[in-house]
Amino acid sequence: MLSRGDTFLTGDEQDDTLHPWIILTPPSEGEVVTVSVTTKRRRSETLVELHPGDHPFIVHDSVIAYSYSRIRTVEEIEVAVASGTAKLREPISPKILERVCNGLLDSDFTPNGIRNFYKNTLESNR
């Protein structure tokens, strides 16, 4: 069962690149909020930066791309893992998870529907 703080890599069909994702919420009615970790570029949102050593998949300066946040079904992720199109990785540390979650709420780029789902999910799990 997937849980808050779990990470996975999934590919881009266009260029065969694996992209890291972090699960920010416990499952709620079979759905979770995920955020993408991307390479830090000149125009990247830098609200939450990650550096080598923050997690084994972070090999160069990276950022959380809140504009790519998604609500996914647990089933979608589990099917992708079972089929080999996604790979589970080590969970993110609680300290970094907290930074990433705070960023989701603070970012101007987080879609409102994602922000609301996140807040509602955490409130219902208290």
Image: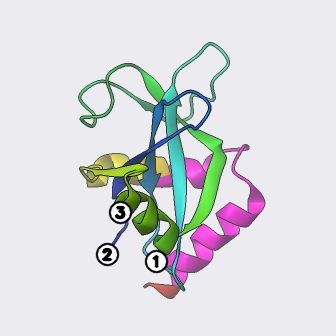
Of the 4 image quadrants, the one containing the C terminus is bottom left
**Label 2: which residue?**
1
Q: Secondary structure at mark 3?
A: helix
From the viewer's side, name the closer residue of 14 and 60.
14
**Does the segment drawn in magenta span residue 118?**
yes
Residues under numbered marks 3 and 2 in contact, where contact means CB atoms less than 8 Å apart:
no
Q: How are the residues colored?
A: rainbow
Position of 116 with respect to 103 (left or right) is right
CA distance separating discs 1 and 2:
9 Å
User: What is the x, y in percent for residue 1?
Assistant: 31, 75
User: Which mark is in front, 1 or 2?
Assistant: 2
**Label 1: which residue?**
27
User: What is the x, y in percent for residue 26?
Assistant: 42, 74
Residue at the top extreme?
Answer: 42
Q: Earlier in the sequence, mark 1 or mark 2?
A: 2
User: What is the x, y in percent for residue 18?
Assistant: 44, 35
The amino acid pointed to by label 1 is Pro
The amino acid pointed to by label 2 is Met
User: Which mark is in front, 3 or 2?
Assistant: 3
Give the residues drawn in magenta, as a range: 101-123
CA distance separating discs 1 and 3:
18 Å
**Does the segment drawn in magenta span residue 25?**
no
Residues under numbered marks 1 and 2 in contact, where contact means CB atoms less than 8 Å apart:
yes
The amino acid pointed to by label 3 is Ala
From the viewer's side, name the closer residue of 10 and 121.
10
Q: Quadrant of residue 72?
A: bottom right
Q: Secondary structure at mark 1?
A: loop
Q: Which mark is residue 82?
A: 3
Judge whether 35 appears above or below 32 on screen.
above
Judge whether 8 appears above or below 50 on screen.
below
Q: Residues within 10 Å of mark 3 (few under 14, many from 20)?
A: few
From the viewer's side, name the closer residue of 80 and 51.
80
